[in-house]
Image (tube, helix red, strand yellow):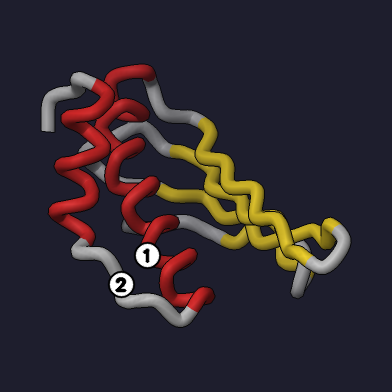
Amino acid sequence: MTGRILVWDPPNVFEHQRCQPIVEDGVVRYELRTDGQETVLRFTHRGLGARNATGFRGGIHAYLDRLEAYLNGDVLPDWLARRRQIVATRGETP
């Protein structure tokens, strides 16, 4: 995988290009903003076609679940098991 950093504005925004031979090039963006006592993460991944975006969705969701557990001091869910659960719930092909 290759790419370049497009936006670097710590601690608010990190955006990078994602170039992989097996999928379309894309742009991934992480934005943090304060909402009262909480911090909200907005994650976007632009540039993927519908088929590839569907394939990425379960894995990204599972990673974000692990991040939430880590930040809460909880046991990290197994990534593969969580991804399979998400994909099955949505009726998608793993």
Closer to the camera in the image, 20 or 82: 82
Q: Is residue 31 left or right of residue 67?
A: right
Q: Quadrant of residue 57?
A: top left
Q: Quadrant of residue 77?
A: bottom left
Give the residue displayed 20% in from the left and 20% down from the top: 91
Q: CA distance from mark 1 to mark 2?
A: 5 Å
Looking at the image, residue 72 lies above or below residue 36:
below
Earlier in the chain: of badge 1 and badge 2, it is 1
Report crowding for label 2: few under 14, some 14 to 19, many 20 or more residues within 10 A (C-alpha).
some
Closer to the camera in the image, 58 or 29: 58
Looking at the image, residue 63 lies above or below residue 71:
above
* Kind of residue indicated by mark 2: Leu
**Count the marks: how many?**
2
Of the 4 image quadrants, the one containing the C terminus is top left
Q: Are marks 1 and 2 in contact (CB under 8 Å)?
A: yes
Disc assigned to residue 76: 2
Q: Is residue 51 left or right of residue 84?
A: right
Q: Which element is circle 1 on?
A: helix
Q: Where does residue 3 sit, x and y in percent of width and height?
A: 46, 56
Judging by the rendered image, the residue that carries numbered circle 1 is 66
* Kind of residue indicated by mark 1: Arg
Report crowding for label 1: few under 14, some 14 to 19, many 20 or more residues within 10 A (C-alpha).
some
Closer to the camera in the image, 94 or 66: 66
Q: What residue occupies the far bottom of the structure in this picture?
A: 73
